[in-house]
Amino acid sequence: MREQERGGASGGREGRQELPPQSPEEQARAICLRLLTGMPRTRRQLADALEKRGIPEEVSQEVLSRYEEVGLIDDAAFAGAWVESRHRGRGLARRALAQELRTKGVHTTLVQEALEQLDSEQEERTARELVERKLRSTRGLERDKRIRRLAGMLARKGYPEGMALRVVRGALEAEGEDADDLGYPGL
């Protein structure tokens, strides 16, 4: 709302009171705080946002370093929370999670540390849950088509092919289909 419509600080005078232009540091801080208010961000995400808005590199680095010092930017915490959230919520496997974190600019070491919270058993358990949910919707389809759909769904979520086929085979066997009839010898 404009100053004159509010009848605010200008004492009812016509026109708006101009604020002094912000320094690049003030602009950078304001941009970062606004972006961090909505959700956590990685250092690289913030650096990219500052670059797009024309903030000089040296100013960006100074502001971002200060925000890291005070804990407003923490890529390790971001990566850990991301892995927990996306694995639980979307059922993504380690491979897909690693790709997402790399895309967001998280350092490889931090990605590996975050992924350590997921073990193979938990990942396979999640794959089984995903297949169980999808299994009903594939009933009535040819066996080969069911296998392709179920294994494809797991592959899109980053699960390794061997694990995907093993989980699908187990689910179909539990449902009563003969593993020898699945068209994949040696499963």
Image: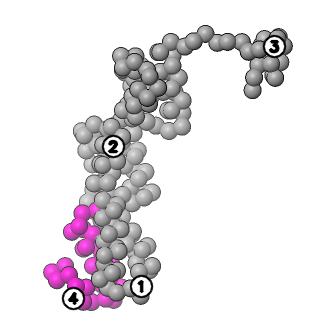
Instruction: Give how far apart the Cα atoms at labels 3 and 4 are.
Output: 85 Å
Q: Marks 3 and 4: which is nearer the front? A: 3
Q: Secondary structure at mark 1?
A: loop
Q: Marks 1 and 3: which is nearer the front? A: 3
Disc 3: which residue: 14
**Is 5 situated left or right of 36 in this image?**
right
Q: Secondary structure at mark 4?
A: helix
Region rendered in magenta: 159-187
- Residue placed at 53% from the left, 23% from the top? 30
Disc 2: which residue: 103
Q: Say what amino acid the circle numbered 4 marks.
A: Asp
Instruction: Give how far apart the Cα atoms at labels 2 and 3 are.
Output: 50 Å
Give the image location of residue 55, x and y in percent. Answer: 43, 20
Q: Say what amino acid the circle numbered 1 marks.
A: Arg
Q: Does residue 160 belong to the magenta stretch?
A: yes
| Quadrant of res 92 | bottom left
- Residue placed at 54% from the left, 29% from the top? 34
Instruction: Give how far apart the Cα atoms at labels 4 and 2 are.
Output: 41 Å
Marks 4 and 1, the one that precedes in the sequence: 1
Crowd rating for badge 4 (residues with CA inside 10 Å; few <14, some 14–19, many 20+)? few
Closer to the camera in the image, 22 or 93 = 22
- Residue placed at 28% from the left, 54% from the top? 95
